[in-house]
Image: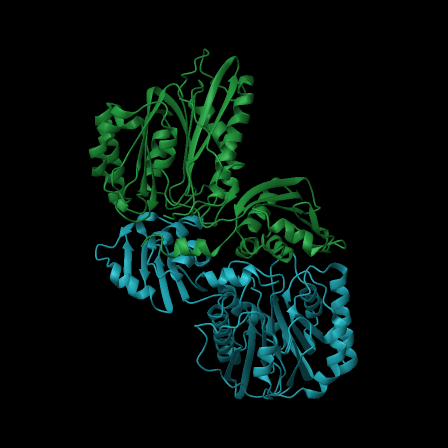
Chain colours: A cyan, B green
Amino acid sequence: MTATLSPLAPVSYPELPALKGVRLATAAAGLKYEGRTDVLLAVFDEPAQIAGVFTTSKCTSAPVDWCKQKLSKGVARAIMVNSGNANAFTGKKGTASVELSADILSQATGFSVEEIYLASTGVIGEPLPAEKFAGVADGLVADAVPDKWMDAAKAIMTTDTYPKLSTRTVKLGETAVTLNGIAKGAGMIAPDMATMLGFLFTDAAIKAPVLQQLLSECVSGSFNSITVDSDTSTSDTVLLAATGGAGGGDWIDDVTDPRLSDFRDALSDMMLELAQMIVRDGEGATKFVEVQVESAESDLSAKRIAMAIANSPLMKTAFSGEDANWGRVVMAVGKAGEPADRDKLEIWFGDIRVAVEGERDPDYSEEDASAVMKKAEITLKVGLGLGQGRANVWTCDLTKEYVAINGDYRS
Amino acid sequence: MTATLSPLAPVSYPELPALKGVRLATAAAGLKYEGRTDVLLAVFDEPAQIAGVFTTSKCTSAPVDWCKQKLSKGVARAIMVNSGNANAFTGKKGTASVELSADILSQATGFSVEEIYLASTGVIGEPLPAEKFAGVADGLVADAVPDKWMDAAKAIMTTDTYPKLSTRTVKLGETAVTLNGIAKGAGMIAPDMATMLGFLFTDAAIKAPVLQQLLSECVSGSFNSITVDSDTSTSDTVLLAATGGAGGGDWIDDVTDPRLSDFRDALSDMMLELAQMIVRDGEGATKFVEVQVESAESDLSAKRIAMAIANSPLMKTAFSGEDANWGRVVMAVGKAGEPADRDKLEIWFGDIRVAVEGERDPDYSEEDASAVMKKAEITLKVGLGLGQGRANVWTCDLTKEYVAINGDYRS
């Protein structure tokens, strides 16, 4: 845990409205941290429709395995999240821990374990003492109220320096619906997903298969387009739950339903905002960087090149050192393994074109390029000159503080 | 340039013997550095057979393009190397620079430009002022002597904190032959190749196609099995030249010739030693780490997993923080995308098994594991429990010093 607020933290936080059909409560189960909450419970008044996306790690955590099993049904009554312990690589004990967690919550709520979702974040490899949930479960159920969003966002933080919340209100057909989301990130952040938890809620009436398709569509350009350190967690989880509490008639069960248009945009927008909040709170970050790759052979190729740039330690240290070192951009494009023609490359830092046609821009001014690098928010653009493919990804710089945080995170 | 000697530097340097048929000279052309040499010339008394391997970057430097063109002939009369400027991403100026460099050297030596090899390392994107070679070329040719190996190794350094040299003497059939090698590394070091130059010389009589096959075989387990920062340079070059000066009869022109057996081992061994020297001089390094992956589905799969571990910022910071954080090993195995079964994983730090069957070893002792991490040389072993595939790779830790070096390398 780092005590210093990220210099890229937001200046204010949105106040999330109550969302009909979901209630929240937090508690301190004492899993690892002293003097703070570490458990979040979200309960649904009526069975909610639910969708999820998870880490692509081959060594998934026990709660990720649990959620994936439950998702085929697409119905949730409760989500319980803890911070401080990821319950990952805990072998048979890990499976036993999620089962015990679900049993405890099932007894406290009266809901079937089949409709209980679990997520954990924190240290890997330490057995999770799930019996500690027994001491707080009844209190969580009794305390749950509709407007505890800030508390909820705080309870799931690990090395995060600030809570991450976002909200949108849109029309779904004639009905006004709300989207609320919270997330956590900080380190071990690379797409597919990151040590990143995101919990998105809506009172819209949308069936699980449609939610799943919307979530999967939107994750590619948001949570899967960010990177802090290229390290992919065992535990990444994003859940999207719909309560239907806003009313408005039938549950939408077709992803091509024209009423979804604004909802889809709002979901995508909210997910991008949360994803960018995670980058801004990257461990040790002092710079927020948008990498834009244009005119690549394909969108996928553009994204791979953008990620090669965003993950390059030499690029990330150049950002922290405020050095307009475009030679390292060339290096990163070259190492991506994607189609690239050295002599067609164009590179911009902010509005300053620094390289064109395979060499330094004739009008290059070190002073102008350096001025861009001194900003807290930097856009780096690369033109490949090959096709129509494009991608944007977001990252932060690599600082001594990142090394310090991760040199003694566990101890 | 960093002034502090790597704590992992060798305590002594080998004295390389003169090698019949090759002479060396160095000079200060003033390309970037003050008060040190920055050009190396190796000249061959008779045409040497030559082989090379190069970066896989899609944005190769002009000298890499030049060498690749010449290699089809397999004959060299001279190799000229400069430090301080990589002549990479310099567009048409880059091509003009290598042509001018070769012309200058051709005039000084009388050799055809077709038999002149060039390599450059240093800053990317700055035009190389090749005309500066004109001031030193005649002197280099006049000064060249057979025993300047230490000077040669020093002239090609960039952010290296010590020169890298290695030598072997073996029997090739009945003939005693010598292998001498020098290399440079430090940052932008990832396989395929790294910003890494290596120049290997032998007085053995071996034809270019055989040299090429031996070099390509040996590079996989040596220079292509190291990583400092996962960043692949535009300029990586390893050349292997054979003068035949040791005599011994016919030139070997068949890679299955039984006389090559010891030579192949010696070449492989020397290349591994030089590669490991580069890791020990990784920018900011305080730990030398061997990552061993065993019982993977295949050797290739093992190598990918080993590289995922070796390149993980969270692993590398755990090494610098002396934290036996095996949870991060699980994370890195999981993110590699290769076949892995969480519940079969075994992990050792040194001789200490920390995890078995998907969870913490029942006999795990934090104290014992931490004792391993406090050493300057650490072996990390991972057993996948799936097959016979294995790979060893070598890396160093990620420190605040790496960030400092690369935050202001150029300026």
Q: How many marks?
A: 0
From the viewer's perspective, is residue A73 above or below residue A143?
above
Q: Please give left or right for residue B136 compared with residue B375 in the image.
A: left
Tell me where residue B49 sits by quadrant.
top left
Q: Please give left or right for residue B288 compared with residue A84 in the image.
A: left
Q: Is any atom of residue A205 visible in this view?
A: yes
Q: Is any atom of residue B112 visible in this view?
A: no
Residue with the most extreme top position: B249
Q: Position of residue A309 (x, y in %)?
A: 42, 56
From the viewer's perspective, is residue B292 above or below residue A137?
above
Please name the residue shown 34% across and 36% down the image.
B155
From the viewer's perspective, is residue A252 above or below residue B212?
below
Q: Please give left or right for residue A122 compared with residue B87 in the image.
A: right
Residue A74 versus residue A183: which sits nearer the camera?
A: A183
Tell me where residue B296 sits by quadrant.
top right
Locate the C terminus of chain A by quadrant.
Answer: bottom right
Q: Position of residue B284 (x, y in %)?
A: 46, 50
Q: Please give left or right for residue A33 compared with residue A214 in the image.
A: right
Residue A375 versus residue B252: which sits nearer the camera?
A: A375
Please name the residue shown 45% across and 11% down the image.
B249
From the viewer's perspective, is residue B73 above or below residue A293?
above
Locate the N terminus of chain A by quadrant.
Answer: bottom right
Q: Position of residue A336 (x, y in %)?
A: 44, 51
Residue B192 versus residue A382: which sits nearer the camera?
A: B192
Q: Position of residue B397 (x, y in %)?
A: 52, 51
